[in-house]
Image (cartoon, coloured by chain):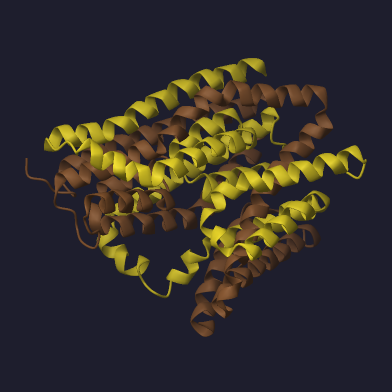
Chain colours: A yellow, B brown
Amino acid sequence: MRNYMQETDRYGKLWIWTAAVVVAMVPIVICLHFNAWPEITAVLKGLLGVAPIYWTVGAIEVITYTPMLGTGGTYLAFVTGNLTSLKAPSALNAMENAEVKPGTEEGEVISTIAIATCSIITTLVLVLGVVLLAMLAPILNSPVLKPAFDNILPALFGGLAVVYISKNWKLSIAPLIFMVALFLAVPSLGSSVGVLVPVGVLVALGAGRIMYKKGWL
Amino acid sequence: MQFNPNSTFLYLVATAVILFVLAQSVFFLVRAYKRGKELGMTDQKLKKTILSTAIFTIAPAVSILIGIVTLSKFLGIPLPWIRLSVIGALTYELPAATSTANALGVSLSEMITDPKVYTAIAWVMTLGIMPSIILPPILMKKIQGGMLKLKNKDSKWSDIFMTSMFLGMISAFLGMVFSDIRSGIAGWIPIFVLLFSAVLMGVCGLLIKKCKMVWLETYALSISMVGAMAFAAIITPILV
């Protein structure tokens, strides 16, 4: 087991550092090609509006999702993005269906397969979508479909929750009550759900620890 | 060089980036599949994971495509395509573009024609998401080492620990659904959608267990998600 995991870590590092270079090269080649370098102050000002939040959320996401997704899954998911809305739920659903536990090598394999499949299909759908954009744009922008896509997260998490909560209902009570109460009390938090995932995790872990110690689980 | 946010050059850059992402995904997929076989997992189980995930991914992928359409109105197609294929999400990229445009005093209501504005936005988008790509390799050893220690020390608690993490994530999203209910009936729609999705999943679960329709397992999450999305499209015009 150690060998596969160690190799995954080595390859993962190689890929993700290469990805970092590829990502950084995008604005560089665009600036070089058009010979249009932006004012540093403009970039800094723009960055000031988003970086404090993004960098904090980025760091929190790495700490929160790495144990869930496993080594290979993490290296892949952090390059391809859309973690909370796509990669983490699909890895969780795949592990649940395959009846393997996260944190085991079997879990690692299934999680990686799910995240890789997810990335490939997303990329292909986007390629197809871009090629056919002129044709698809009126459909995608149609007011009939808008509510469907506006509600994609409740549509996804409703189904996922049934499976996961029904199997672990004792562990679910505390984080669920806490989160519903929190969002009811402070509705404006709705737009920063990403930041609140680790809060939910901490509540679940705290309650889980107490119940475990008391022998309720 | 005449600037055009939809130039062939930018499409070539996008293609290169997308090929890189595909290559990395295929590399990890093949490795994990082979390892799964070595661990004694059947082809059927592994293929089922691929099929189930592939079908489930389509609707969220279309929603990402809508993100590209939104951003393409002022950034052209290639840059949003790159950003939403690598790390990005619309929730990141739109504020990044808006923040930069505000700093430069530019409006995003029409296509950007000034290359300096375009490149400033490209830089802010890129620098904004860099920690997500740099931190995993730096922190991986510590996090996974910690998890291994936990597992060796107390494997039952380690299982509860992992389950709690997922439940924490699910709880945050379930809680979020309740954030709009003060805005009247429209704010209840996400809750109805959530419940409808839960009911669909419950029905799928019953069919799988009671009617032995095991094949349905592969599609259950997709059915509940897409079914609930369709439900949202139907009830929203009625309720709002």
- Picture residue at 24% right of the left edge, 56% below the top: B74
Residue A50 visible in rendering: yes
How many numbered marks are there? 0
In the rendered structure, the answer to whether residue A19 lies left or right of residue A40 reads right
Q: Is residue A46 left or right of residue A57?
A: left
Q: Is residue B61 above or below residue A36?
A: below
Against B115, residue A136 (above or below) is below
Q: Where, quadrant-wise, is the N terminus of chain B in this rendering?
A: top left
Q: For the point 38% across and 39% down, which residue is it?
A: B128
Question: Where in the figure is residue A69, as x and y percent of width and height?
Answer: 60, 36
Q: Nearer the viewer, residue A130 or B39?
A: A130
Q: Is residue A132 left or right of residue B132?
A: left
Residue sitting nearer the eye, B223 or B172: B172
Residue at far top of view: A3
- Tell whether B218 sits left or right of A34: right
Q: Closest to the observer: A154 or A52?
A: A52
**Residue B14 appears in the rendering:** no
What residue lies at 72% left-to-right and 56% top-to-bottom? A178
Instruction: Residue A158: name its quadrant.
Output: bottom right
The residue furthest right is A215
Query: Taking B31 as reference, is A208 above or below it?
Result: below
Residue B214 position in % (x across, y down): 71, 54
Residue occupying the far left of the picture: B1
Percent x, y of residue B5: 18, 49
Residue located 71% across and 23% down the image: B148
Residue A10 image point, x, y percent: 51, 18
